[in-house]
Image: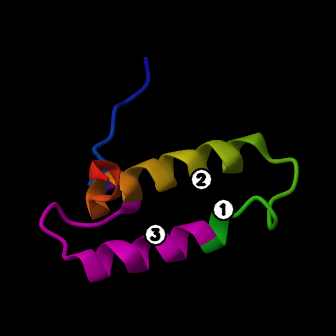
Amino acid sequence: MTKLHAYNDNLKVARNAPLKTIRAAHKRLTQRFYPDKNPGDAEAAQIMTIINTSYKVLSGLDKC
């Protein structure tokens, strides 16, 4: 069974983190797991999907 994580746990930020902190965490993680830096790595691609989804929800972009 896989462990479920909250969106803020995926980005490694506090629950009450301001948008500026969320953006910085997203940028840091995307630079690490970006597909161009990890060609052919399926795990990195999956992590990028999780990171982008978490950022989208926490930043409010999913409400558009």
Q: Secondary structure at mark 3?
A: helix
Q: Residues within 10 Å of mark 3 (few under 14, many from 20)?
A: many
Residue topped by disc 3 = 26
Q: Earlier in the sequence, mark 1 or mark 2?
A: 1
Residue 27 picture location, percent across and down: 51, 75
Quarter of the figure with residue 20: bottom left
Q: Provide the residue span drawn in magenta.
A: 9-30
Q: Is residue 28 left or right of residue 19?
A: right
Against 34, residue 48 (above or below) is above
Q: Residue at 70%, 64% (x, y): give it.
A: 34
Depth order, front residue of 47/59: 59
Q: Main secondary structure of the magenta part?
A: helix
Quarter of the figure with residue 37: bottom right
**Tag 2: residue type?**
Met
Quarter of the figure with residue 46: top right
Mark 1 and mark 2 residues within 8 Å of each other at the beta carbon: yes
Disc 2 from disc 3: Cα separation: 10 Å
Q: Residues within 10 Å of mark 2 (few under 14, many from 20)?
A: many
Residue 24 picture location, percent across and down: 41, 80
Disc 1 from disc 3: Cα separation: 11 Å
Q: Of the numbered discs in the image, which one, if any, rests on residue 33?
A: 1
Depth order, front residue of 8/55: 55
Residue at the limit of the structure toward the top, as seen here: 1
Q: Residue at 81%, 64% (x, y): give it.
A: 36
**Tag 3: residue type?**
His
Residue topped by disc 2 = 48
Q: Residue at 76%, 41% (x, y): give it.
A: 42
Q: Of the numbered discs in the image, which one, if any, rests on residue 9?
A: none
**Tag 1: residue type?**
Phe
